[in-house]
Image (cartoon, rainbow, N blue to C red):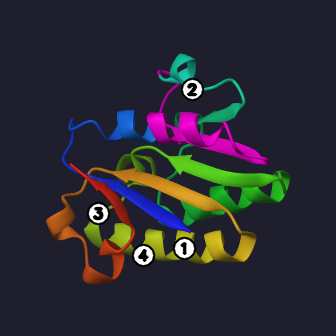
Amino acid sequence: MIQLIVGSEGKGKTKHLLDKVNEEIKEASGNIVFLDRSTKHMFELNNRVRLINVSEYDFENKSEFIGFIYGIISQDHDIEQMYIDGIMKIARLDKEGFEEVVGKLKTISEKFNIKIVISASIDSAEISESLKEYVIVAL
């Protein structure tokens, strides 16, 4: 399952994402991974959530980012949920790249039975109709 939290820069998407992960961890039976561009939110996350600071891994394009996701999954077969904060910057995406990467993440989510929640600095009006069904918060 894929879920999207979208909106302009600075509208509070990260807060929604943090609230969601901290609520979900209470009932999670598997592992939860949170991908962020820094460790800034480390103390806002439940200590059972694995925070990965992706700034340590210089992705040059969306293919490298998807490969990184596969690498995480291959090392931990107990991942139940994955949260990605600021995917546009992390994976260096434009609008078209965003739709392509979300499509690939949807496939990964279904194949490995992992819930993936993504925050993206993109206006909900700019998202294609095919992705609008995945939007859970639009700011």
Kindly identify which numbered label has been placed on residue 98: none
Residue type at mark 3 is Asp
At which x and y percent is residue 47? 69, 23
Residue with the mark numbered 1? 106
Q: Distance of mark 2 from mark 3, alpha carbons?
A: 28 Å
Left or right of 84: which side holds 111?
right
Residue with the mark numbered 3? 94
Q: Nearer the viewer, mark 4 or mark 1?
A: 1
Q: Nearer the viewer, mark 2 or mark 3?
A: 2
- Residue drawn at (69%, 43%) of the image: 27
Left or right of 93: which side holds 20?
right
At which x and y percent is residue 42? 56, 21
- Residue drawn at (37%, 47%) of the image: 89
Q: Nearer the viewer, mark 1 or mark 2?
A: 2
Residue with the mark numbered 4? 100
Q: Distance of mark 3 from mark 1, alpha carbons?
A: 18 Å
Badge 1 crowding class, 10 Å Cα cut-off, few under 14, some 14 to 19, many 20 or more, is: some
- Residues tagged 3 and 1 counted as in contact (Cβ below 8 A): no
Q: Nearer the viewer, residue 90 or 114?
A: 114
Left or right of 117: which side holds 31?
right
Residue type at mark 4 is Glu
Residue with the mark numbered 2? 45
Residue type at mark 1 is Lys
Secondary element at image label 2: loop
Furthest residue in direction front, as rendered = 27
Q: Distance of mark 1 from mark 2, alpha carbons?
A: 24 Å
Q: Nearer the viewer, residue 91 or 124?
A: 124
* Magenta stretch, residue numbers: 18-40
- Residues tagged 4 and 3 counted as in contact (Cβ below 8 A): no
Secondary element at image label 3: loop
Q: State the image quarter where residue 26 is shown.
A: top right
Q: Distance of mark 4 from mark 3, alpha carbons?
A: 10 Å
